Structure formats: C-alpha cells, structure tokens
Image (cartoon, helix red, strand yellow):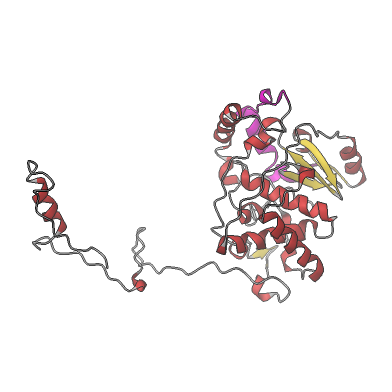
C-alpha cells in the first residue's frame, strides 16, 4: 500500500471550514461520549486547523513522504501511540436492496486489495476505517464514494482503484474471506482496535501528514490514525448514510497509464458488477423534467376554454368567499395524470 490511506472527499474540501465549524458546534453542545476523556470537551479543532489537515492529506500531499523503506520504518516506530480517547465506533446502519449489494462489493474490494493477506483483525480494521469515513462529514456519505474517491483523478485515495489492481485475478479464498468480513461490518460488527480511525498507511512509508494525526494502532503492516482532538472522537461522526447512488463499475476509471482497464464483467474471476438500474429516456431539449410514459398513463391537460378546467373551478370558489365550506358547490376538477 502506497497511497492507500484514503484522504478527504474533494467535493467536501471546498467547504471544509464550514464542516469544521459545524463539528465544533455539534461537539461542544452534544452529550459527552461515555468513553471520552475528562478534558475532551476542550480538545476542539479550529476551522483553520481542520483546513490545514485537509490540505495535508489530499492531492499530491497525500503521497508526500519523508522516507520509504527501512528509514520509514524507523520513523514510524519512533512516533508514539495516542490511545487516549480511543472511542469505539457506532455499528453501521445497514440498508437493503441495491444499496446493500453495491456497498458490499465496494467494501469487499477495499478489504481484499488493501489488506487481503493481512491478519484478520487488520482486514476488519480496514473495513472499519471505510465505514468510519462514511460517518464523518469530511468524507463521502456512501461506502463506494469513500472507496473510489479520486479514482478518476491523478491522485486516488485508495490506490487499488486506479493503479490497475482491479485487473488482477483475486485469490478465491482471500476474496471469500473479504466478502465475509465486509458482510459482518455492514451488518453492524465493530472493530474496536482502531476505534474511530479514518486514515492508515503501510509501515514502509512515512508520510509527512502522519505526525499531524493521532496514531492509534499498528496491525500487520498498517499503522492507523484518527483526526486529532474531538474532530476524531465519536461525537464528531454525525453524518448520515446516504445509500449508494453509484456502484463500483460506474466509479472505477476506464484507463490506467494509457491502457484500457478491464471491466469487471470481462474478468471471469472478478465479481459480477451490480447493475446501475434502468435509464429514463429524455428528449434532447429536456431541461430537467422526467416524463416516463412507460407506466401506462398519459398526460391530460384540458384546454383553457374547457369549462371543467381546474383553474376555473378554483376561480369560482375564490369568487364566493362569503360562503361557508358546506355551502360551496363541489368543484369538478379533471385529473391531470392517469
């Protein structure tokens, strides 16, 4: 894993200061977390600090390393853990149907390609990081949105989504285990070892942003971090899950290094793609209205001179304000759509 530390969603970066301000209000007025440290209420993150963290963990800064290899391992080992205030994340709230199928596939991919041969607890920890991000206002509000953030941009957040890894045939046993772990996480299983961690990286790289975050755990080759202060505490994870408007097949890039990437349906060992759903045909000059006449009804708009037109019926009622509701004649209003 090189860039597999998943940063912030660029669409939300432009309002990071507002997010931070909202979090300050939510955290300072909310009920103290049962696992919170006594002085946690004073560990607030100022909007300017939040913006600095956003900038330090996105784009080119995401892959800006102080060292790699053995030197990085020494730097990482020297950085102390900050296990104070290690909150347990709330269980994920599942949704059914297409949302669940898409979320399951994206989370399975993240577990397999990020940590498919790490210890089981390490695989669960990666799943927990993804779900923690879904809950934090600084990230996307969907599982696939978190996993595939930046996949079609120069610097993706989980590098497997844009470096060609998805073209590799997954090992059957490890893939099945990743599916099982993803299912458990989506059904509410929480991995307590990493708490509310939202970032991680391999121990053979030392990113410049790491000292800005709170180092909470090391599992296998991965080191896990949470945001500093209350921005990384459980009360800050207030974002609701918005479902999965797009699945993995729609979010993954088409090309990598000039080469067309294999689509999931073209790789016999890859999981079958979750369908994106039917498209509603629009006229070329449609400016936003969706008129689907395939359901068996047609639009019926009476002419203005029609005596039974709804507008005339309403006008008659308005012309007699002195009448009580009981005295008013019943209006005959034609049905607009049937």
- Residue drawn 54% across and 51% down? 242
Q: Quadrant of residue 224?
A: top right
Q: Is residue 284 left or right of residue 66?
A: left
287 sits left or right of 193 in the view: left
Q: Position of residue 248 (x, y in %)?
A: 62, 62
Q: Is residue 203 left or right of residue 229?
A: right
Percent across and percent down for residue 306 are: 10, 63
Q: Residue 3 placed where, x, y %? A: 75, 50
User: Compared to 45, does 94 lie above or below?
Assistant: below
* Residue stretch in magenta: 38-65
Residue closer to the observer: 180 or 299: 180
Report if residue 162 is visible in the image.
Answer: no
58 falls in the magenta region: yes
- Main secondary structure found in the magenta portion: helix
Who is closer to the viewer here, 181 or 148? 181
**Quadrant of the rendered structure where residue 58 is?**
top right
Please say if 88 is above or below 26. Answer: below
Going by the picture, which residue comes out furthest to the front?
326
Q: Is residue 197 magenta?
A: no
- Judge by depth and name the residue closer to the eye, 256 or 209: 209
Which of the 4 image quadrants contains residue 228?
top right
């Amino acid at each position: 894993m090189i860039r597999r530390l998943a940063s912030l969603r660029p669409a939300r970066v432009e309002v990071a200061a507002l997010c931070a301000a909202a979090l300050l209000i939510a955290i300072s007025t909310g009920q103290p977390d049962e696992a919170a440290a006594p002085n946690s209420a004073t560990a607030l993150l100022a909007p300017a600090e939040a913006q600095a963290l956003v900038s330090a963990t996105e784009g080119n800064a995401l892959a800006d390393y102080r060292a790699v290899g053995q030197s990085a391992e020494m730097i990482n080992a020297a950085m102390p853990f900050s296990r104070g205030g290690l909150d347990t994340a709330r269980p994920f709230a599942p949704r059914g149907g297409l949302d669940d199928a898409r979320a399951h596939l994206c989370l399975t991919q993240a577990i397999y390609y990020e940590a498919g041969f790490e210890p089981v607890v390490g695989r669960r920890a990666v799943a927990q990081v993804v779900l923690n991000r879904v809950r934090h206002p600084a990230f996307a509000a969907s599982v696939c949105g978190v996993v595939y953030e930046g996949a079609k941009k120069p610097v993706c957040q989980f590098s497997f989504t844009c470096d060609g890894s998805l073209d590799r045939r997954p090992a059957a046993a490890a893939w099945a285990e990743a599916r099982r772990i993803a299912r458990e996480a989506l059904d509410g299983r929480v991995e307590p070892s990493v708490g509310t961690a939202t970032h991680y990286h391999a121990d053979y790289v030392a990113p410049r942003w790491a000292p800005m975050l709170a180092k909470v755990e090391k599992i296998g080759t991965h080191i896990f971090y949470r945001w500093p202060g209350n921005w990384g505490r459980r009360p800050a994870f207030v974002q609701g899950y918005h479902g999965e408007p797009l699945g993995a097949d729609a979010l993954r890039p088409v090309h990598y290094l000039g080469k067309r990437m294999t689509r999931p349906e073209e790789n016999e060992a890859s999981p079958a793609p979750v369908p994106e759903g039917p498209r509603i045909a629009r006229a070329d000059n449609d400016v936003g209205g969706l008129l689907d006449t395939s359901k068996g009804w047609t639009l019926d708009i009476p002419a203005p001179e029609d005596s039974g037109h709804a507008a005339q019926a309403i006008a008659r009622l308005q012309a007699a304000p002195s009448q009580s509701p009981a005295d008013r004649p019943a209006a005959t209003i034609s049905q607009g759509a049937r």
